[in-house]
Image (spheres, rainbow, N blue to C red):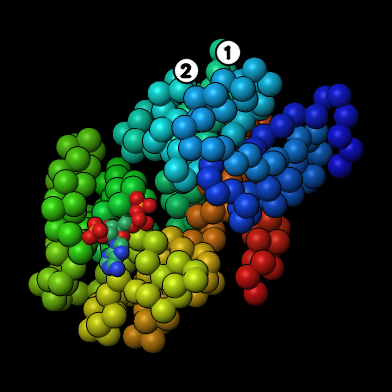
Amino acid sequence: MEIDGRTRICGLIGNPVEHTLSPLIHNTLAQRFGHNLVYVPFPVERGRIVEAIAGASALRLLGLNVTVPYKGDVIPCLQEVDPLAASIGAVNTLVAVPGGFKGYNTDMDGLYRAMMAEHIQIADEEIILLGAGGASRAVAYLCAVKGAKKVYLLNRTLEKAQKVAEEVNSSSGREVIFPVALAEFDSLPDRKFLAIQGTSVGLAPHVEDVVIADEKFYARIHTGFDLIYSPWETRFMKLVKANGGRACNGLKMLLYQGIIAYELWNGVEVSEEAADMVYERLKAYFL
Ligand code: ATR
C-alpha cells in the first residue's frame, strides 16, 4: 500500500501490544477494499490513557481498538458510549466523532458472529460458563440478551459468580444466570451443555492448565468454546474432544471483533468470503 497525504490511521492502544494480530486483520481488509488506511499498534504507558485519547483525537485518527488494561479506564475519556458497551462496562473500539471518540464493544458481537459461523446456538440453550472475570461477565450478558435458557456460571470463588449473576440478571432484566461453585459442578442437571471457557487459564505458555481437570465434567459437554486461541488447542478443548464433544478456539471471535470494528470505521460490510480470507491468514500463524 502506498502511504500518502490522505492515508488514515487506525490502531490499537494497550499494554502490552507487541503480540497483537489486529494489524494483520485490518491491513488485510484495507488492502482488499482498496481503502487508504493503515493500522498500527500504540503501546500506552500506565497512567497516560487520558493523554493518549486526547492525542489520538488531535491527530484525527479514524479509530482505535482498546485492549488490556484500558477497556474500562478509557470510558471516562469518551464523548459517547454505545449502550451495549456501557452495560458490559468495557470498550474495545473507538470511532472518531466530533470532539473525540465514541466507544463500542465489538468483543461480544464478535463472539456471537463467531458462534454463528460455527453453527453454535445460544437461544434456548442451557450453557455452562467458566469464570467470572471481565470476559466471562460480558459473555454472561451476551447469553442473557441472546435468549439463553439458563447459564450456570461456574467460578472458583462463588461470591464473584454471585455478584456477576446479580448484575447481569438485573441489567438484562432476566433471571438467567445461576452462580455455582466450581467444586459443585456435579450438582448440575444431568444433561449435555454448551460450555464457554471465559478465563485466561490455559493461555500460552501455561498450556497444561485447565479450570476443571476432572474428566467427569467433560462427559456433560456437547460443545466447548474456549475464548483462548493461543495455544491453538487448549487443554480444555482437548478434554472436550476426548469425551466426544466438539471444540472451538477463540480465533474466530478475534477475527469478528476486528471485522465489526473495521465495519464501524469504514461504513462497509465485510463479506463472509473476505472474512474467510482474513481467517486463513490468521490461522497460518498457528498451524
Ligand atoms: P478477565 O476476564 O477479567 O481478564 P482473568 O484474569 O482472565 O479475568 O480470569 C479471571 C477468572 O479466572 C476468574 O473467574 C478466576 O476465578 P476467581 O474469581 O476464583 O479468582 C478464574 N481463575 C483464574 N485462575 C484460576 C484457576 N487456577 N482455577 C480456577 N479459576 C481460575
Look at the numbered disc 1 and give the secondary structure of its residue. loop
User: From this viewpoint, is residue 46 visible?
Assistant: yes
What residue does disc 2 label?
Answer: 79
Label 2: how many Cα within 10 Å (few below 14, some 14–19, many 20+)? some
Q: Earlier in the sequence, mark 2 or mark 1?
A: 2
Question: Quick check: marks 2 and 1 in contact, CB under 8 Å?
Answer: yes
Please, what is the three-letter code of the amino acid marked with disc 2? Gln
Mark seen at residue 54: none
On the picture, is 40 further left or further right than 207? Answer: right
Residue found at x 29% / y 80%: 213
What residue does disc 1 label?
Answer: 98
Residue found at x 45% / y 75%: 207
Q: Quadrant of the C terminus?
A: bottom right
User: From this viewpoint, is residue 139 visible?
Assistant: no
On the picture, is 16 further left or further right than 40? Answer: left
Give the image location of residue 41, x and y in percent. 65, 43
Please, what is the three-letter code of the amino acid marked with disc 1? Pro
Give the image location of residue 275, x and y in percent. 64, 53
**Mark 2 residue's CB less than 8 Å from ligand 1:** no
Residue found at x 67% / y 21%: 60
On the picture, is 174 further left or further right than 139? Answer: left
Label 1: how many Cα within 10 Å (few below 14, some 14–19, many 20+)? few
Q: Give the image quadrant in which the ligand numbered 1 is located.
A: bottom left
